[in-house]
């Protein structure tokens, strides 16, 4: 297993140490979990096929939306 070194501001180091202590795990394990989560972040396998493309119902159609309503401008009276 590789060993990495990094520098962080003292406030961040204190927060990380406290989180590790609260969870009852070594700081190195907490850091490894954070790195693993960041590196492996991405779409789960088959996400687009199962979720986005997984609609089995009738073809969805968006109805006509009409004209947008008039609204007062932001920041005060018109």
Image: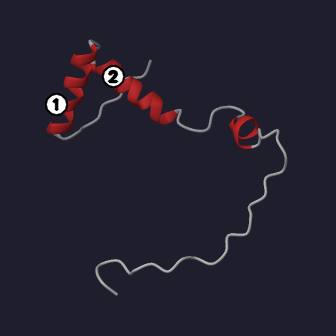
Above or below residue 6? Residue 31 is above
Q: CA distance from mark 2 to mark 1?
A: 13 Å
Identify the residue at horizontal 33%, vertical 22% (top origin).
30
Q: Which mark is residue 14?
A: 1
Q: Around disc 1, counting alpha carbons within 10 Å, would you say few (fewer than 14), some (14 to 19), or many (20 or more)? A: few
Residue at x 63%, y 33% (from the top left corner): 44
Kind of element beneath mark 2: helix
Judge whether 7 appears above or below 77 on screen. above
Residue found at x 40% / y 80%: 72
- Which is nearer the N-term, disc 2 or disc 1? 1
Q: Secondary structure at mark 1?
A: helix
Q: Position of residue 62 (x, y in %)?
A: 74, 61
Q: Please identify the quarter of the rendering in which residue 27 is found.
A: top left
Q: Is residue 29 above or below residue 60?
A: above
Dot 2: few (<14), some (14–19), or many (≥20) neighbours within 10 Å?
Answer: some
Q: Contact (CB < 8 A) between labels 2 and 1?
A: no
Q: Is residue 65 left or right of residue 42?
A: right
Residue 33: image location, x then y, percent: 40, 24
54 or 78, nearer to the observer: 78
């Amino acid at each position: 297993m590789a060993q990495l070194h990094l520098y962080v501001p003292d406030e961040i180091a204190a927060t990380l140490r406290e989180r590790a202590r609260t969870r009852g795990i070594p700081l190195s394990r907490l850091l490894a979990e954070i790195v693993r989560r960041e590196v492996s972040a991405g779409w789960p396998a088959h996400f687009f096929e199962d979720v986005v493309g997984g609609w089995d119902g009738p073809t969805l159609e968006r109805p006509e939306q009409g004209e947008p309503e008039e609204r007062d401008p932001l920041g005060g009276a018109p």
